[in-house]
Amino acid sequence: MARPVAGVLAKAAVVLLLVLCMTRRSSGVGINWGTQLSHPLPTSTAVQLLKDNGFDKVKLFDAEDSILGALKGSGIQVMVGIPNDMLADLAGSAKAAERWVKANVSNHVSDGVDIRFVAVGNEPFLKTFNGTYLNTTLPAMQSVQAALAKAGLGGKVKVTVALNADVYQSPSGMPSDGDFRDDIRGLMLDIVRFLASSGAPFVANVYPFISLYFDPHFPLDYAFFQGSSTPVVDGGVTYENTFDANHDTLVAALRRNGFPDVPVVIGEVGWPTDGDANANPEYAQRFNQGLMDHITSGKGTPLRPGVPVDAYLFSLVDEDQKSIQPGNFERHWGVFYYDGQPKYPLSLRGGAGTLVPAKGVEYLKQQWCVLKRDADLTEQKVGDSVSYACGQADCTSLGYKTSCGGLDNRGNVSYAFNSYYQTNDQDDLACNFDGLATTTTVNPSAGTCRFIVEIVPTGTAASRNVAGGVATALAALLLALLVLESGL
């Protein structure tokens, strides 16, 4: 009788393990880990930050060896992204897909990294791309899927694509009328069919903040989770927040086209803390805590009641090298500042709570670069220097109703100088500006405006050149001109 009993116990243990894994997955909280920083945290520090705060899942925008290596044995589930500029190669070559899978999935899975999904492309159908990726996204997904199957990982790692919420819409504005965008409807149905065939989720990025940003008449309370004075009544269903309405517009689109059971994952959702009048820590805390409470309640949405929302917060830390073409807020989505310090209280399990800061972070010297007291603001070289500094570093905290909006004109110039100085690792030559600047050990931060001291750069630091193209340089120049003109 010993062997049968042992067999029963072994099976029971397996079942229990599966149940625990399913429970962990349904209650897990994910977050996006972007790397467009001049001074990223060491990968081991960032992984420990994830673990200390109870993040069960992480979404990456690229397969970086150092990050995936740091996630080894962490117990954190991983969604690995493939950038849009790789889609054509993967779509046109099975060998290219096999090489990518071997290098970025197989090798890491065998080394103890819990990769669950590969997101082939990031919002490839945005209208601003002018159809660039319409013919390569699905073939690339199919090619990667075939490569995973060939590597023996087809049952473990699912292929999906992270899509912007504009791929679906409602002509009436009611969630129940949801359908896919007319110009890509056929392609979207092919993609959904592909997802359904493998049990992969539909990944959508949802941003209530963007709705508020582009529409000055958008009701503010409808963007949050605490109830709205202007709810949307859709038949017998009342929507008190735009997140649920957006989510269910997608669910309705899936139902309408014969795919009612395709899982939905919110790939990106969050609220920025700077760079716009509505981007601040108070609103971010209000939104993200409301989202966490919503997720942990397990109540789901009106069209999927009782199905817990599965979402990845955007994002882990601020990224000072992100494009600001959509808006200055783009560099301030982090739940943590650049150095892993929490921006506001947040409980990932609902209710009251706080985040744990990053441990062991090393900083450069406690010194800053500021405008000399005797500098003449009317000199042309002041404006030229600010334009240069903001073209090479991050000045997006300057402006109307931002964290540094209360600075006077001299403070604005000092902020720009210090940002450039810190980005360049406090190099002496980075605090000159034609004799206008000097260093100080007195912290010039004032009120909500933080003059940062950068962290010690790591070997994985990205290029120090943050100009990033003509658009960023022009935006920085305009910002600098506005800063100077507003104070003179």
Image: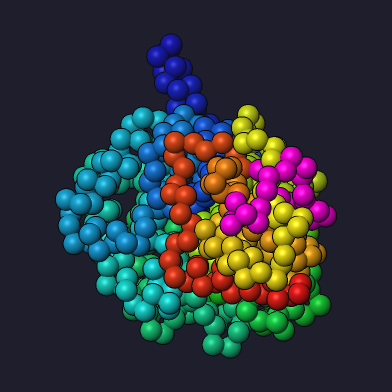
Q: Is residue 108 above or below residue 5?
A: below
Residue 443: name its quadrant: top right
**Is residue 50 part of the magenta span, yes or no?**
no
Instruction: Please name whichever residue, 202 or 166, is drawn nearer the observer in this view of the structure.
Output: 166
Q: Is residue 243 left or right of residue 471?
A: right
Q: Residue at x 36, y 55 (%)?
A: 82
Instruction: Please name whichever residue, 55 or 436, is drawn nearer the observer in this view of the structure.
Output: 436
Q: Is residue 296 above or below residue 470?
A: above
Which is the main secondary structure of the residues drawn in magenta?
loop
* Residue 439 x %, y %: 68, 45
Q: Is residue 404 left or right of residue 43?
A: right
Q: Is residue 258 left or right of residue 230?
A: left
State which region is magenta: 432-453
Q: Residue at x 37, y 39 (%)?
A: 65
Q: Quadrant of the C terminus?
A: bottom right
* Residue 335 x %, y %: 65, 50
**Is residue 439 part of the magenta span, yes or no?**
yes
Inspect this view and state whether residue 78 appears. yes
Q: Quadrant of the N terminus?
A: top left
